[in-house]
Amino acid sequence: NAGVTQTPKFQVLKTGQSMTLQCAQDMNHEYMSWYRQDPGMGLRLIHYSVGAGITDQGEVPNGYNVSRSTTEDFPLRLLSAAPSQTSVYFCASRNSYSTDTQYFGPGTRLTVL
Amino acid sequence: RKEVEQDPGPFNVPEGATVAFNCTYSNSASQSFFWYRQDCRKEPKLLMSVYSSGNEDGRFTAQLNRASQYISLLIRDSKLSDSATYLCVVGAGKSTFGDGTTLTVKP
């Protein structure tokens, strides 16, 4: 199993550009999440999904959209990039709402100029 | 006040030392608690879950105090390889992460 994969690993955007961060997992996990991590801080939840077709907002959802058309994929879309969105983005999955372990992808390092 | 607060770091300790981290949480209804480890610029990985009765995994011991709303992590006989940032996490669904405590173990 590849676990949780994320692409791209690095990305530089100009203010106002849009892009999609990709996340996929091959563990048949129902629950997936997107987090951002700013320097010196913990992870903050952006959006999450408890199954295909179901998404909900986390702590910091503004400026981001998600969709969950399949169990495997959970892309994160930046609608109009802003410098405040410069961060490291982690995708995670777990196999049920209450399961202990979240498995994280390697992260996408995004810089918005 | 943050929902999850951790000891400010960094902690610099010699090999073989015992070090303890504390974490407080504000939501008394929380049911799930974890410690994750994060190496520099890498993804977090689960270190251990924290159970009401306390739990131990080798050199690591986690404790939960519901009355005072804090959890702790004790590392005994520190190794160089324990150097990392330790993240306190509350909640299994909409998880809330602390800002992390950085540990550096020196020879």
Image (tube, rainbow, N blue to C red):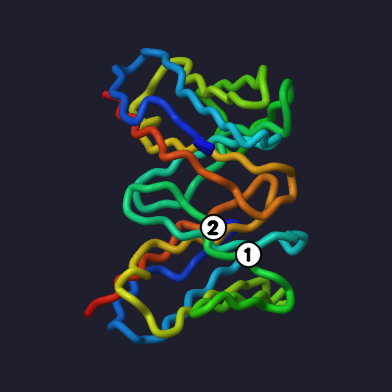
Residue B46 is tagged as 2
Residue B49 is tagged as 1
Marks 2 & 1, CB-CB < 8 Å contact: yes
Residue B87 coordinates in the image, percent (x, y): 49, 60
B59 sits to left or right of B52: left
Number of residues whose C-alpha sits closer than 10 Å to that of mark 2, classed few (under 14), some (14–19) or many (20 or more): some
At x 34%, y 34%, the residue is A109
Circle 1: residue type: Ser
Judge whether A6 appears above or below B72 on screen: above
Question: Which structural element holds mark 2?
Answer: strand
Residue B99 coordinates in the image, percent (x, y): 46, 57
> Can residue B95 be seen by looking at this rendering?
yes
Same-subunit check for callouts 2 and 1: yes
> Can residue B74 be seen by looking at this rendering?
no
Judge whether A45 appears above or below A8 on screen: below
Residue lying at the far left of the rendered structure = B107
- Counting every numbered tag in the picture gives 2
Residue lying at the far top of the rendered structure = A17
Q: Name the residue nearer the viewer: A108 or A29.
A: A29
At x 42%, y 16%, the residue is A19
Residue B16 coordinates in the image, percent (x, y): 34, 86
Judge whether B77 appears above or below B30 on screen: below
Residue A102 is tagged as none
B36 sits to left or right of B41: right
Chain of the residue under label 2: B
Number of residues whose C-alpha sits closer than 10 Å to that of mark 1, classed few (under 14), some (14–19) or many (20 or more): some
Q: Name the residue nearer the viewer: A18 or A68.
A: A68
Circle 2: residue type: Leu
Chain of the residue under label 1: B
Q: CA distance from mark 2 to mark 1?
A: 8 Å
**Viewport quadrant of the N terminus of chain B:** bottom right
